[in-house]
Image: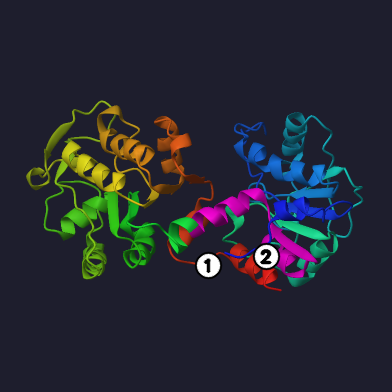
Amino acid sequence: MNFIRFSDLCAQNLVKGRRVFIRADLNVPQDDAGHITEDTRIRASIPCIQMALDAGAAVMVTSHLGRPTEGVFKPEDSLAPVAKRLGELMQREVPLKSGWVDGVDVQPGALVLLENCRINKGEKKNDETLARKMAALCDIFVHDAFGTAHRAEASTYGIAQFAKTACAGPLLAAEMDAISKALANPKRPLVAIVAGSKVSTKLTILKALAGKVDQLIVGGGIANTFMLANGLPIGKSLAERELLEEARAVMAAMKARGAEVPVPTDVVTAKSFSADAAASVKSAADVADDDLILDIGPQTAQKLAQQLMAAGTIVWNGPVGVFEFAAFEGGTKTIAQAIAASNAFSIAGGGDTLAAIAKYGIEKDVGYISTGGGAFLEVLEGKTLPAFEILQKRAAG
């Protein structure tokens, strides 16, 4: 992907004295009292902000927080807790400015946080007047919020369209590089793991990947639907019977390319969905009518681990079993460890996937961990994200 990198502009001394507008992702979770409960996104945004300050820019930063009503300011929608935490982490005063669309007074070397951008009327619909006003505030627009890259909003797309210069910050650039490496120019074989409770939520992803990957591993409730499509019993396990033909179509598309969707040969079952349920390992053909399939079996896990060890590129979205319960974590743990040990370039994304990566302590062994959620899924679907599109367009002149 061809786009302008903010780091390059800084290295070329093109930022000093300039007004820099950074669209960050500071949408952090808070408790009922408004206290931040987890500050990863704030910490992740600091390198870009510090880069701009070190380069001598006048720095403005904004983000959305929660789901405010446009045109209506409520105290609970304020970025005030974010400004406080950002100030603590950066060891400097971070003033918060509201009503900023018509002008911001900020000097080179100074930093100001602009109040929740989703309060501005026209933000979500990418209103051109609002976007032009935002663009007029700065000399350089820096998009550093991958979590919003799939939305064409005024503070993500419109401003990039009209700003004098539009570029990608270090977080967004890293995502763009990783996605390009994993999907645009992958080292083969390319193996994708798509797991989750429902085929319907991942169907477009499965169809898109069926035309690209060399192996498509399915897990969780999705695997149950594929097992059923293959004529295997699944007892009372979660599955979508109305999508059996869709599952068969995905398998046929893979087979036509000489690839496959490996269906579990053994599974771990229980009679109830609970952490203390007794686990039974059995052949996939022997699942009883009152069984719940809660994980892939050790034989299947080992076979998949060997495929992952031989991969050139791995894309991972979703655990393959109920890994939160100790008796049903074997499959996900084996796969996580195989990805960690593999020489393949790996990219992983999705909330449950990140939880599994943290649980098994393999953060340092995954090539790239995407924090984008919805944006990551849209990339897997084969969609061009609006943020990528406009930054590439601006780079092309």
- Image coordinates of residue 4 in percent, x first then y, are 68, 61
- Image coordinates of residue 151 in percent, x first then y, are 60, 62
User: In the visual, does 10 lie left or right of 309?
Assistant: right
> Quick one: label 2, few (<14), some, or many (20+) residues within 10 Å?
many
Which residue corresponds to the image point at 14% horizontal and 59% vertical from the top-left? Answer: 230
Return the residue found at the far top: 276
The verdict on residue 33 being magenta is no
Q: Which residue is mark 2?
A: 157
The magenta stretch is 153-180
Q: Amino acid at mark 2?
A: Tyr
User: In the visual, does 351 lie left or right of 86?
Assistant: left
User: In the visual, does 166 lie left or right of 317?
Assistant: right
Q: Amino acid at mark 1?
A: Thr
Depicted 30 relative to depicted 224: above or below: above
Q: Front-most of 161 and 309? A: 309
Which residue corresponds to the image point at 86% horizontal and 46% vertical from the top-left? Answer: 56
User: Distance between the Cα atoms at labels 2 and 1?
Assistant: 13 Å
Q: Which residue is mark 1?
A: 384
Question: Residue 255 got which mark?
Answer: none
Q: Are marks 2 and 1 in contact (CB under 8 Å)?
A: no
Q: Is residue 220 visible?
A: no
Which residue corresponds to the image point at 22% horizontal and 63% vertical from the top-left? Answer: 244
Q: Front-most of 390 and 181? A: 181
